[in-house]
Amino acid sequence: MLALQGDFAEHEAALRHCGLRCRQVRRSADLVGLAGLVLPGGESTTMLKLLDVEQMWQPLGAALRSGMPVLATCAGLILLAERVENPNQRSYGLLPVTVVRNGYGRQYHSGTFALVSDVLPPGTTGTFIRAPRITHTGPGCEVLARRDDDPVLVRSGAILAACFHPELALGHPVTARFAAAVRAHAGAAGRGAAAATAADCGA
Ligand code: GLN
């Protein structure tokens, strides 16, 4: 998991709970040999600065485009969006969505809300913390869950992205879904059964 800033430790605990091995990614060299990648929640502007400081913008972009499963939450989703507003800022543009940063208000408005979804178990909730709001989804973007009418869990290719924080609840179905994708990817890459049950996940 990208471990420059944000709640990577919570992601690590959540993924270990699902039986995955984890590696903190702080330099380009840490990206080698991963079967999955997590972009955690945190502060997207700070992450952008640190990616530049560590000269990781390009290597991380290559890893994100490689086809391995990616889980992006909150600030991580902002880093991947095609278009970022409030304010406009640089992003990888790999996820066909427009997001408005802090689109649900400030910390005061943060909280846990019901999700409406055909693919998540009934009663699944999501915790939103100064969350981005998806205001537009483009072609190739599948909406997997909504909060009221807004898309809040989307998938595009190997990227699964949430406006909320599944990592704050051990055993959250979104984390389980990502873990299953990592195992499938590791298995398909021919790393064998052992790797498939305990795949290295850069988060
Ligand atoms: N508000 C943060 C940002 O714009 C994201 C918040 C989060 O990751 N919980 O980067």
Image (spheres, grey):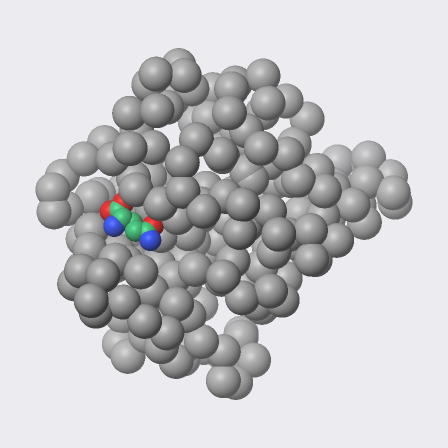
* Residue situated in front as seen by the camera: 57 or 136: 57
Indicate whether 23 appears above or below 185: above
Residue at x-position 56% and y-position 40%: 203
* Residue situated in front as seen by the camera: 42 or 150: 42
Q: Position of residue 148 (x, y in %)?
A: 28, 79
Indicate whether 128 appears above or below 58: below
Q: Position of residue 141 (x, y in %)?
A: 38, 55
Q: Where is residue 184 in the image (x, y as percent from the top left)?
A: 72, 49
Indicate whether 182 appears above or below 143: above
Residue at x-position 58% and y-position 68%: 173
- Horizontal side of 17 relative to 134 (left or right) equals right
Residue lying farthest to the left in this orientation: 87
* Residue situated in front as seen by the camera: 12 or 191: 12
Q: Position of residue 179 (x, y in %)?
A: 65, 54
Residue at x-position 41% and y-position 16%: 54
- Horizontal side of 77 relative to 180 (left or right) equals left
Residue 21 falls in which quadrant of the image? top right
